[in-house]
């Protein structure tokens, strides 16, 4: 039994030179609860977010929600203190534990548990340990969600009985350093991704005319002619999709079935719909709308409203609007970006204001005024925005890869 226990205290992946089993200790042996109250009148209140860690309440909520009458009873939080937030979520099923990395003191509601750790454990190691799910089983066994379904309940005395698996300090430091570098890479790509998204938003705003102007703020060299303004419905065919009902009777596994394009088939990255999860029987064709490669589809929900280019033949249900440029007024990439530009979304909202229309429809989209330059300028704009999309996609994929690596390593490098 002792041999089995030792095997259980060895991680799947570890650094060369370390072979001894990890030691199991109690949180209370490493940490002590911070009982210092706000007698010195500290004004800045912190909050502990599952996704963003310990942040200033002003930054998180855009306003201070602290009750000034009770702030004297708040707990003082020092740099490197750990905070347990009992509020549960999908990201933190028994509440998050995060470290104060703000390099300054603040205060937190007494609903939070604040604790400091001694120098027998590396703070960065412990911070990453709490990013794993290793401590969740103890919490679920010893605590409960209490009377409020969104708040976990566990007493301090039980909380500090939590078992913490610890290697020697040198191995802790190596693990902490590895995850620190991984976090830096994730932050780097997140910043690049965020900057590219801001740039894309700015380009969509400035590369298309607005406010009735016939000239965009930014355009490529060699293009000087005014853009033409027309109603979109005068230039393209716009039709709503349709659904054969009950749809369950038309879904088929037959490979000869028709591609059934649903909102979930739209890719998170990219502009082209290349496959569908389901097919429908050919006899359902008369009750739906067929689309072909090169057609555009636009979700009729204004909260979604992102256009896509069909790369396959299929059928669309009534959650989509079909936009077909039969007369070839547009470069398809240009049209796709234009339909999702802020100028178009603003028109949709303006037309729908004060009415009972909550979704986009054929008339509303068709009445939108669009500006179009020559085909050559359309092509250049489409290429530029597509390249920007490709860069955004690249960094988003790198982010996903790094986050998946971190998730895997958190699972395999801790006991």
Image (spheres, rainbow, N blue to C red):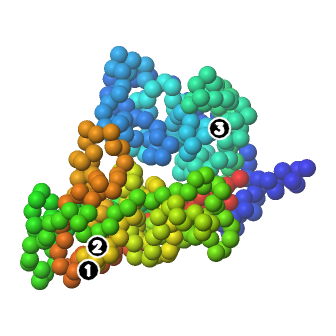
Q: CA distance from mark 3 to mark 2?
A: 58 Å
Q: Mark 1 — residue? A: 379
Q: Are the residues tagged 3 and 2 within 8 Å (C-beta)?
A: no
Side of 166 relative to 47 (left or right): right
Identify the residue shown where x is 71% and y is 41%: 137
Vertical comparison of 77 with 198: above or below: above
Q: Residues within 10 Å of mark 1 (few under 14, many from 20)?
A: some
Q: Hey, which quadrant is residue 161 in on the image?
A: top right
Q: Mark 3 — residue? A: 27
Side of 127 relative to 20 (left or right): left
Q: Earlier in the sequence, mark 1 or mark 2?
A: 2
Q: Mark 2 — residue? A: 334
Q: Position of residue 157 (x, y in %)?
A: 66, 26
Identify the residue shown where x is 48% and y is 68%: 290
Q: Position of residue 15 (x, y in %)?
A: 66, 66
Frontmost residue, 29 versus 268: 268
């Amino acid at each position: 039994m002792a041999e089995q226990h030792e095997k259980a205290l060895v991680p799947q992946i570890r650094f060369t030179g370390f072979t001894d089993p990890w030691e199991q200790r109690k949180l209370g042996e490493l940490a002590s609860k911070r009982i210092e109250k706000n007698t010195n009148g500290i004004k800045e209140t912190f909050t502990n977010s599952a996704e963003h860690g310990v942040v200033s309440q002003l930054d998180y909520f855009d306003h201070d929600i602290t009750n000034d009458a009770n702030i004297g009873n708040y707990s003082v939080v020092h740099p490197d203190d750990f905070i347990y937030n009992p509020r549960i979520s999908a990201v933190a099923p028994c509440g998050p534990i995060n470290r104060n990395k703000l390099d300054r003191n603040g205060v937190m509601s007494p609903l939070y548990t604040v604790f400091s750790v001694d120098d027998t454990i590396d703070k960065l190691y412990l911070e990453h340990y709490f990013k794993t799910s290793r401590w969740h089983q103890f919490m679920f066994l010893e605590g409960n969600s209490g009377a409020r379904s969104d708040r976990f309940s566990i007493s301090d005395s039980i909380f500090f009985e939590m078992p913490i698996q610890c290697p020697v300090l040198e191995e802790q430091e190596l693990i902490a350093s590895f995850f620190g570098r991984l976090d830096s890479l994730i932050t780097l790509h997140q910043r690049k991704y965020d900057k590219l998204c801001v740039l894309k938003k700015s380009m969509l705003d400035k590369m298309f005319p607005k406010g009735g102007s016939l000239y965009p703020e930014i355009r490529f060299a060699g293009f000087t002619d005014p853009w033409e303004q027309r109603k979109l419905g005068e230039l393209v065919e716009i039709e709503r999709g349709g659904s054969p009902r009950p749809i369950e009777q038309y879904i088929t596994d037959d490979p000869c079935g028709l591609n059934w394009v649903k909102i979930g088939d739209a890719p998170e990255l990219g502009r082209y719909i290349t496959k569908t999860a389901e097919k429908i029987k050919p006899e359902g064709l008369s009750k739906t709308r067929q689309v072909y490669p090169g057609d555009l589809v636009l979700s009729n929900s204004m909260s979604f409203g992102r256009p896509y280019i069909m790369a396959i033949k299929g059928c669309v249900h009534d959650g989509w609007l079909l936009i077909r440029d039969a007369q070839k007024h547009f470069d398809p990439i240009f049209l796709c970006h234009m339909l999702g530009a802020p100028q178009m979304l603003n028109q949709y909202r303006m037309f729908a204001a004060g009415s009972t229309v909550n979704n986009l429809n054929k008339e509303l989209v068709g009445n939108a005024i669009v500006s179009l330059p020559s085909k050559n300028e359309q092509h250049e704009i489409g290429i530029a925005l597509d390249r920007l999309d490709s860069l955004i996609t690249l960094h988003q994929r790198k982010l996903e890869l790094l986050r998946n690596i971190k998730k895997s390593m958190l699972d395999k490098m801790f006991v």
